[in-house]
Image (cartoon, rainbow, N blue to C red):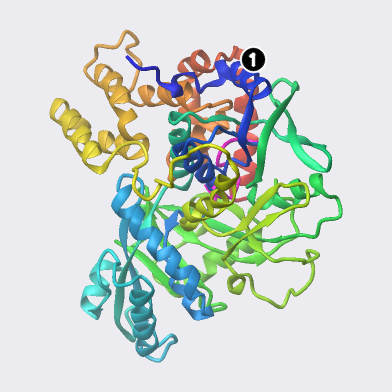
């Protein structure tokens, strides 16, 4: 039986990974474990490039777990004449909906139209046709206008006065952190080396060219040197910090925009579909997005000079979202008490040469979503800007610079052909196989295959034993098998990693997250090698984290 590289991708094998990083020379070393870095990582590994990736915190810790959870073409970009970005985004969305159905799910978006309110039906119709054109008429389904009656059946919470009907078009929903982790794992399956909690502390140069980096293992304090022919800075909101390690006089390439989201239980919002609407406060485009059994309300979009490590929701952000929703659906009883979860994140928007304070009159929503590649005098390649939807194209752009300079035959780009973690047919067969064995578990089996691809076979095998009462631990629930899998195959290092970016659900409120940890502590301690004291320390730390970043006062 072939060795599975993911079986040693866990906290117990960290030292072996550091030993490899410090003893071998890589063709390519990527700094940054968000969707951009992991997309470059996967593409490079598939091409046969010897590749390593280091991440300062956890994989998907930054922007890549704090988005609106959508893979979308960007209908609103057309208003700002962003046709290029919209075309690329639509093309990528359509590709992933076909290639990676388990991760990228098409969903209908409703845009209600009211008599006497902007945008008018005529203007929206033009926008819909432009969206079809930039998508080359390849959208999941063609847009249509539905009647007032049909609109109210799909969205009972809408204000009915002066409602004419709604346009329906399709984009796609995604779990952004899961997308990032699965992309990373596919790179590891194809020979890549990756480690988290390893910030870069020094860039080492010879004759003014970067030859290696020094990283520090945050869990032990030990430092290691890693050599590579090419260094790529794909750190998103931290790009300028890495660039200043290279050249302290470098001017900023990005500026941070902050987005805040509120999560509601599905049953608390009187909608059956995702709704796109303009905030009655300032006409900003907003979403009530249906995802993972919850409704996600977002987002704000404001320039900030905050610490990138501190994406805290502010009272004004929360009030803006709530007031926008309440004024849009005044009879829907959308209250602060119904908010289950709140989170904020930063967008690293391309803003070359800015000083962090200039040009505040430019709205963040009008700033470019295009990406940009910089090659410094020392040879470091930095990629900034872009968006979740176009990360695969950004990876391709970076690697097309690197591959001609590697003196051996490499594969061409294959990320547009190869599914992540199993083909659609294999996923369907897997769901069918385990559902026949246990029909009662069909909803959870489907979730597992959507999350973990073909690796879900191992989880289902263990979960079925638990469900049938054949597991030695009679307290065990089927979710235990999932926890074991992620701890053994996804480099979980902390309780926060486990609940925020691996095995938790978006709609779990802070209380639920802590309850699940406490209930499963005997399993988690064993899997991660935690003593009672270490578990309690991390539990209390996670409680403070939830209060600070994810709880409304």
For the question of whether residue 476 can be seen, the reply is yes
Residue 216 rendering spot, x and y as whole percentages: 73, 28
What residue is shown at x 35% (from left), y 90% (from top)? Answer: 122
Which residue is the extreme one toward the left?
436
Q: Which residues are magenta?
A: 56-66
Q: Quadrant of residue 427?
A: top left
Which residue is the extreme one toward the top?
472
Residue identifier under label 1: 533
Specify the principal SS of the magenta part: loop
SS class, disc 1:
helix
Residue 283 rendering spot, x and y as whole percentages: 53, 79
Q: Quadrant of residue 538?
A: top right
Q: Is residue 550 above or below residue 280?
A: above
Residue 491 rendering spot, x and y as whole percentages: 53, 26
Q: Is residue 209 above or below residue 105?
A: above
What residue is shown at x 59% (from left), y 26% (from top)? Answer: 539
Q: Is residue 147 above or below residue 210?
A: below
How many labels, in total?
A: 1
Residue 59 falls within the magenta-colored stretch: yes
Which image quadrant: the N terminus?
Answer: top left
Question: Taking 512 as reference, is 258 left or right?
Answer: right
Question: Taking 455 as reference, is 330 left or right?
Answer: right
What residue is shown at x 73% (from left), y 33% (from top)? Answer: 212
Q: Quadrant of residue 270?
A: bottom left
47 and 430: which is toward the camera: 47
Which residue is the extreme one toward the bottom?
116
547 and 91: which is toward the camera: 91
What residue is shown at x 60% (from left), y 45% (from top)? Answer: 405
Residue 317 rendering spot, x and y as whole percentages: 62, 62
């Amino acid at each position: 039986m072939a060795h599975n590289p993911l079986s040693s991708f866990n906290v117990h094998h960290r030292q072996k990974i550091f030993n490899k990083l410090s003893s071998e020379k890589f063709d390519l070393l990527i700094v940054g474990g968000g969707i951009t870095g992991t997309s470059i990582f996967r593409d490079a590994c598939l091409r046969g490039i010897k590749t390593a990736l280091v991440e300062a915190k956890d994989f998907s810790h930054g922007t890549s777990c704090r988005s609106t959870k959508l893979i979308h073409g960007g209908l609103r970009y057309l208003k700002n004449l962003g046709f290029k970005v919209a075309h690329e985004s639509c093309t990528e969305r359509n590709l992933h909906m076909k290639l990676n159905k388990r991760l990228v799910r098409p969903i209908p978006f409703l845009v209600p139209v009211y008599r006497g309110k902007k945008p008018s039906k005529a203007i929206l119709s033009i926008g819909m046709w432009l969206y079809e054109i930039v998508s080359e008429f390849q959208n999941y389904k063609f847009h249509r206008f539905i009647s007032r009656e049909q609109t109210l059946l799909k969205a009972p919470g809408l204000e009915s006065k002066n409602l004419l009907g709604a346009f329906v078009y399709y984009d796609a929903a995604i779990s952004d952190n899961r997308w990032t982790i699965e992309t990373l794992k596919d790179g590891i399956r194809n020979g890549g080396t990756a480690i988290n909690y390893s910030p870069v502390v020094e860039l080492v140069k010879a004759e003014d060219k970067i030859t290696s980096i020094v990283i520090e293992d945050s869990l032990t304090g030990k430092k290691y040197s890693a050599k590579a022919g090419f260094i790529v800075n794909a750190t998103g909101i931290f790009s300028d910090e890495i660039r200043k390690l290279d050249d302290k006089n470098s001017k900023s390439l990005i500026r941070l925009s902050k987005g805040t989201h509120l999560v509601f239980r599905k049953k608390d919002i009187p909608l059956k579909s995702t709704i796109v609407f303009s905030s009655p406060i300032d006409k900003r485009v907003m979403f009530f997005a249906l995802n993972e059994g919850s409704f996600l309300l977002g987002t704000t979009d404001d320039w900030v000079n905050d610490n990138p490590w501190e994406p805290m929701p502010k009272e004004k952000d929360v009030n803006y979202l709530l007031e926008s929703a309440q004024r849009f659906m005044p009879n829907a009883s959308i209250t602060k008490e119904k908010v289950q979860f709140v989170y904020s994140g930063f967008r690293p928007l391309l803003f070359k040469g800015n000083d962090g304070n200039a040009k505040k009159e430019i709205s963040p929503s009008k700033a470019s979503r295009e990406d940009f590649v910089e090659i410094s005098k020392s040879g470091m390649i930095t990629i900034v800007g872009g968006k979740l939807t176009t990360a695969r194209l950004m990876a391709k752009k970076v690697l097309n610079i690197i591959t001609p300079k590697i003196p051996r035959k490499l594969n061409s780009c294959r990320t547009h052909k190869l599914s992540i973690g199993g083909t659609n047919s294999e996923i369907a067969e897997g769901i069918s196989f385990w559902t026949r064995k246990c029909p009662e578990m069909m909803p959870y089996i489907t979730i597992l295959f959507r999350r973990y691809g073909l690796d879900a076979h191992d989880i289902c095998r263990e979960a079925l034993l638990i469900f049938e009462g054949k597991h030695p631990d009679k307290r065990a629930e089927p979710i235990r098998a999932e926890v074991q899998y992620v701890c053994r195959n996804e480099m979980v290092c902390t309780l926060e990693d486990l609940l925020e970016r691996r095995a938790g659900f978006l709609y779990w409120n802070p209380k639920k997250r802590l309850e699940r940890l406490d209930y499963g502590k005997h399993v988690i301690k064993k899997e991660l090698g935690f003593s009672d004291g270490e578990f309690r320390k991390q539990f209390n730390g996670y409680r403070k984290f939830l209060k600070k970043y994810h709880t409304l006062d």
